[in-house]
Image (cartoon, rainbow, N blue to C red):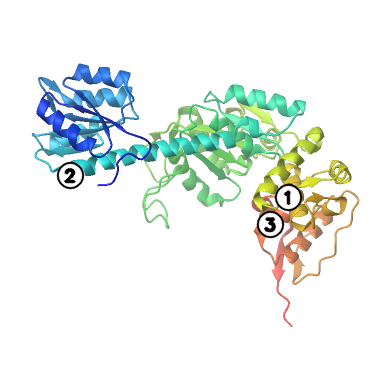
């Protein structure tokens, strides 16, 4: 048997009214580099748990006139991070079920071999180690997505961060609005990771990326046979987010039928899977985001008014990069530090002339466009210092600089009339340059892949390969 201690010397509490049993277990576990403490009664065990950091409790079902199940219940309620294993000479299916219901991690019937006991102990400690690693990882993620990582010194960003920090510990529903690329998801993650739900899941879904006919099933689940392709029962994202937060990005694209179900959840915390006859409770905080004006959509009958007010309890409106232009230089420094570490080519700096060029740009793609511009410049630069010529804008507003001509590898058939020929032409050139690879095209344009897909759909662009 390998060393059972994986995160330092583990402490095991053995609870049994028989001295011989306690000592034999202590000797066996001590050989595995485990520190063993002993208790001969329920009250003595409770005292040890209150004073010491215990990783695992091994208790007999009968502790004199007391019941080991009562101890397991106490451990579950007061020390939920402590594992427990029940040992008994009165093995039965009924007592096993009762032990598991009380919170025991495992169940062992006398007589048992030393090897069998060590296997059960090892399994329980591995489970505890895994849980600790998950918590550590989530804490690391929380630091990565903390409010300190929302870079900016502008008054608008400072006010937004202050508001977001105040609402983070609550369960209040929040609506984050702002243009594409302004950092809506970053704020949503920061709110989640500074809440009491930080150890719970954060489920993100882009409502515009899923067909309307499938969105309801994705969010709320479905039961087998509820529609043609429902070959098995599926848990929805709201249920998967139980105990955590769900982030509904581009909520403005949610169809009216799904809006009704979302409203029902926000009213009573209940969901009903597609095809189900009963609802079920879930404990989920909702954060929504969109880059459209929901108030105008309500006025135009495109979005439910009652849902709008349910979502808009705490509004956070993120400014465009131009509206917080004083943050451009500090954001540039931040991105260049990140890019330097990723590329491993030494510290990348930028000239004053290049910074001035950044400051003169209109940034229609906002922060995402700034990051992409710097990445592009760092990738193509011949030195670790970005100069004016290394800064190239790939948007429909190019700050007075011409775009390089791209030789198309395909031709396009355009149907319908567009009111924005400049933007359409830009998308065509970028698509041709990247051979219609949506991911690469979206990255170059400084927009999301979903936004690109909507633009292609809006302008009704179709690809036709040219045959020689």
Q: How dense is the environment of label 1, judged by Cα within 10 Å: few (below 14), some, or many (20 and up)?
A: many
Q: How dense is the environment of label 3, judged by Cα within 10 Å: few (below 14), some, or many (20 and up)?
A: few
Residue drawn at point x = 69 percent, y = 32 percent: 295
Q: Is residue 257 left or right of residue 30?
A: right
N-terminal of the two: label 3 or label 2? 2
Q: Which is more foreground, mark 3 or mark 2?
A: 2
Question: Could you tell me residue 371's position as x and y percent?
Answer: 73, 46
Front position in the image: 234 or 272: 234
Q: From the image, tell me which residue sits under label 3.
A: 457
Q: From the image, tell me which residue sits under label 1.
A: 372
Above or below residue 296? Residue 78 is above
Q: Say whether marks 3 and 2 touch (CB < 8 Å).
A: no
N-terminal of the two: label 2 or label 1? 2
Q: How many angstroms separate mark 2 from mark 1 (CA)?
A: 57 Å
Question: Could you tell me residue 351's position as x and y percent?
Answer: 85, 45
Residue drawn at point x = 75 percent, y = 53 percent: 378
N-terminal of the two: label 3 or label 1? 1
């Amino acid at each position: 048997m390998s060393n059972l201690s994986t995160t330092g010397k583990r402490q095991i509490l053995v609870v049994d009214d028989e001295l011989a049993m306690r000592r034999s277990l202590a000797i066996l576990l001590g050989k595995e580099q485990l520190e063993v403490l002993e208790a001969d009664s329920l009250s003595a065990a409770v005292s040890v748990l209150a004073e010491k950091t215990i990783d695992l409790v091994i208790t007999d079902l009968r502790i004199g006139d007391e019941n080991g199940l009562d101890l397991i219940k106490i451990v579950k309620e007061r020390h939920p991070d402590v594992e427990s294993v029940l040992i008994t000479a009165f093995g039965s299916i009924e007592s096993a079920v009762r032990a598991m219901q009380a919170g025991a991690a495992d169940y062992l019937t006398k007589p048992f071999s030393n090897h069998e006991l060590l296997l059960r102990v090892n399994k329980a400690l591995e489970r505890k180690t895994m849980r600790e690693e998950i918590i550590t990882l989530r804490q690391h993620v929380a630091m990565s997505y903390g409010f300190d990582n929302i870079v900016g010194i502008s008054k608008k960003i400072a006010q937004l961060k202050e508001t977001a920090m105040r609402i983070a510990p609550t369960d209040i529903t929040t609506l984050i609005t702002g243009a594409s690329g302004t950092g809506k998801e970053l704020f949503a993650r920061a709110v989640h990771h500074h809440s009491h739900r930080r150890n719970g899941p954060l489920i993100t879904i882009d409502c515009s990326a899923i067909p309307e006919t499938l969105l309801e099933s994705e969010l709320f689940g479905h039961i087998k046979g509820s529609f043609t392709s429902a070959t098995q029962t599926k848990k929805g994202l709201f249920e998967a987010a139980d105990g955590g937060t769900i982030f509904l990005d581009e909520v403005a694209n949610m169809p009216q039928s799904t809006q009704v179900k979302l409203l029902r959840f926000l009213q009573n915390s209940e969901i009903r899977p597609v095809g189900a006859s009963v609802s079920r409770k879930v404990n989920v905080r909702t954060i929504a985001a969109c880059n459209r004006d929901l108030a105008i959509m309500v006025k135009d009958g495109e979005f439910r008014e009652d849902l709008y007010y349910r979502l808009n309890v705490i509004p956070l409106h993120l400014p465009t990069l131009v509206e917080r232009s004083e943050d451009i230089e500090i954001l540039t420094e931040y991105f260049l530090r990140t890019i330097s570490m990723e590329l491993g080519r030494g510290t990348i700096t930028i000239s004053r002339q290049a910074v001035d060029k950044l400051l003169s740009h209109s940034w229609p793609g906002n922060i995402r466009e700034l990051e992409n511009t710097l990445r592009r410049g760092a990738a193509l630069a011949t030195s670790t210092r970005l100069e004016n010529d290394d800064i190239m804008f790939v948007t429909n507003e190019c700050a007075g600089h011409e775009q390089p001509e791209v030789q198309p590898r395909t031709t396009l058939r355009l149907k319908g009339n567009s009111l924005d020929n400049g933007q359409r032409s830009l998308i065509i050139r970028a698509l041709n340059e990247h051979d219609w690879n949506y991911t690469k095209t979206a990255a170059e344009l400084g927009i999301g892949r979903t936004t690109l897909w909507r633009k292609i759909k809006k302008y009704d662009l179709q690809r036709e390969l040219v045959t020689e």
